[in-house]
Each structure stands twice: as structure tokens, then as C-alpha cells.
Image (cartoon, rainbow, N blue to C red):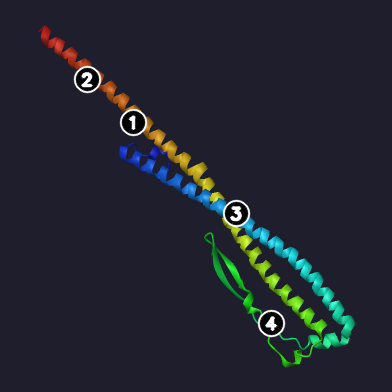
Amino acid sequence: MAIENVRPTRLELLRTRRRIGVAKRGLNLLKLKRSALIAEFFAISREALRLRGDLQQRIARGYESIRNAEMMEGPTRLENISMLLPDVRPVTVSTKNVMGVRTPRVDRGGYAPTEAASLLDLPTSVQESIRHFQGIYQVVLDIAEKENALRRLLKEIEKTKRRASAIENVLIPRLEATVRYIKFRFDEMERDAFSMLKTVKRKMEQEGSGVAVA
């Protein structure tokens, strides 16, 4: 609404001042939320970075264990054994609340290879390879959870920043300009009223003087 369309009344002045107070409190809350979101973002980012470093080490150990198993058992036997390995159970994904942002929670417990009697006599080198890649699978799930959370947090940080900027740079200045306009109109009306009173008083004095002379 344009300032010129604002009614310069006491009620409108009080209402606008209350809106300024509410806007400033909302701005402070948004800034606090943004700071908390940024802190959470960096905490998760550090954890994701650590997991990525761990993943690289696990992959290196995993491929090393595969090479060892291949040297000990031979590529043909290793390929035949791989056909016996069971599938993993589906991963379940739920959501959790991080500073008001809903992020995915990947259920690591969903990963559990089905027991198979044919796997009991596997060579130690093959069992070691399976163990390594099970660990890799779990770390990959953790990284996926963390990076998805980071994307959602970053989106919420940008959204909060835009809202805070709109309140600070648009809404509050507009409301403060409205207050100044109302006060300016009050001053104008007071000056007009004072000028009118002086005119009335002068006319009354002139009329009184005319009566006295008669």
C-alpha cells in the first residue's frame, strides 16, 4: 500500500509502530535461525568430509582384499563364489527434523546379508573382502544421508536469508517511512489548526474592538 493512501490517524500510527516491533522481533528470530542453520551445516559438512576420507581408505582396503582373494583362490573360483552371495535387504529411509528442516534418515540397520549355509565354508580371504565391502556400503549410506541433509539445509539457509533481507531492507524501512509520513501529516494538521486558531482569534479581537468603538 502506498504511503499516500495511509490514513494519518493515531490508531494507524500505533498499529504501524506495533508492526515495526513485530517485524524487528521476527527479523531477530530469522537471524538466530540462520546462524543456527549455518552452524549445523558446517557440523554436518565436517562429518561428511570425514566420512569421505574414511570411504577412500575403506575402498582402498576393499580392493586390496579382493586382489588378495583373487591371488589365493583364483579369478574363476572367486567369480563362482560371487554368484552365491546373497542380496542385501532394501534400505529404509525415514525423516528427521534438523533446525526445522526435514532431512532423510537412512536406516543402516536395513543392511544385513541373508545367512546362507553355502557361505559358511568360504575362504578367510573372501570373508575378509565381504566384510570390507559391507563397511563401504554402510559408509556410502551415511554419506548420502549427510549430503542430502546439506543440500536441504543450504536451501533453507538461502530461504531464511531472503526472508530476513526482505524484512530488514523492504518491510521495516517501508513501515518506518509510513510512521514518518503520519507524523509529518500530524505536524501539518497542527500547523493548520494553529494558523486557523490565530486567524479566528484575530477576527474575534477585531470584531470585539469594533463593538467597543460603537
Q: Which residue is mark 4?
A: 88
N-term-proximal mark, 2 vs 3 = 3
Element type at mark 2: helix
Q: Nearer the viewer, mark 2 or mark 3?
A: 3
Tell me how far mark 3 sits from mark 4, CA to CA.
36 Å
Amino acid type shown at disc 1: Phe
Q: Which residue is mark 2?
A: 200
Q: Residue at x 55, y 67 (%)?
A: 96
When the figure is inspected, residue 107 is found, relative to residue 54, above or below; the finding is below
Tell me how far mark 4 sits from mark 1, CA to CA.
76 Å
Q: Which residue is mark 3?
A: 39
Tell me how far mark 1 sits from mark 2, CA to CA.
21 Å
Q: Residue 61 appears at what percent x and percent y?
A: 81, 72
N-term-proximal mark, 1 vs 2 = 1
N-term-proximal mark, 4 vs 1 = 4
Q: Nearer the viewer, mark 3 or mark 4?
A: 3
Element type at mark 3: helix
N-term-proximal mark, 1 vs 3 = 3
Q: Is residue 207 left or right of residue 121?
A: left
- Pick the front one: 167 or 82: 82
